[in-house]
Amino acid sequence: MQTHINEDGIDCPNPNIIFDGSIKDYLTSITQRYGGGVEGHEFVLRYGRLWQPAALPANIRRGMPKECYSNAAQLAFSRPDLIYIEGFARCKAGPSTPFEHAWCADADGKVVDPTWTSGTEYFGVPFRTAFVREFTHKTNSWTVIAVWKMEALLALPPGKFLHP
């Protein structure tokens, strides 16, 4: 996917590739177009939900650009009051293609994004922190939702990985 650097210095999907609709509509469109062969998209559509964009709280430091998975996981590991989430987000207002992303949220569903300053829409799966810690350690990768991991993830009962 082509990307560009936006006004916040964030590597975002190409603004010339437009999707005018919600992230949920985007995921539905992709899974229908490819006949259910896009497992990560299907997984997020099945277990994800909308999260409320919010400014980063003053007591949380911004992480490294382009390191959303490690930024969010490490924040969730250090803050038991936050929920780790993976899914899709938009990094600019208006029609654009949603981007795979990770962030945290508080108990009220407000996004705590240690990577982006410009997120406008977030749709993702809330994971249990203990599961994220174990799964990322076992797979030696910060991401939970990845094509090469989907078989192992889908074999688990949702109660094992979903945050309540």
Image (spheres, helix red, strand yellow):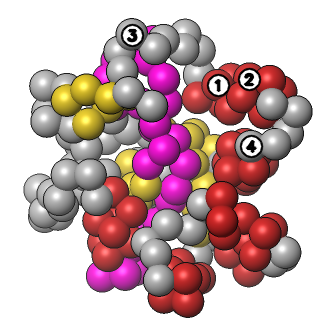
**Residue 102 in the image: x percent, y percent?**
43, 55
Q: Residue at x 39, y 55 (%)?
A: 103
Is 15 above or below relative to 1? above
Q: Residue at x 13, y 63 (%)?
A: 61
Measure how far apart labels 3 and 2 are at the Cα level: 18 Å
Is 102 above or below relative to 80? above
Answer yes or no: do the residues labelled 3 and 2 have beta carbons within 8 Å? no
Query: Can I make out residue 103 in this image?
Result: yes
Q: Residue tagged by mark 4?
A: 38
Say which quarter of the image contains residue 20: top right
Q: Residue tagged by mark 2?
A: 29
**Residue 137 in the image: x percent, y percent?**
48, 88
Q: Residue tagged by mark 1?
A: 26
Specify the amino acid type for callout 4.
Val
Specify the amino acid type for callout 1.
Tyr
Q: Residue 141 got which mark?
A: none
Q: Is residue 46 shown in magenta?
A: no
- Could you say whether the residue bearing mark 4 is in a helix, strand or loop? loop
Near mark 3 (Cα within 10 A), the count class, few <14, some 14-19 or many ≥20, is: few
Answer yes or no: do the residues labelled 2 and 1 have beta carbons within 8 Å? yes
Q: Residue tagged by mark 3?
A: 16
Q: Where does the magenta region start and end?
A: 76-101
Near mark 4 (Cα within 10 A), the count class, few <14, some 14-19 or many ≥20, is: some
**Residue 77 in the image: x percent, y percent?**
37, 81
Total marks in image: 4
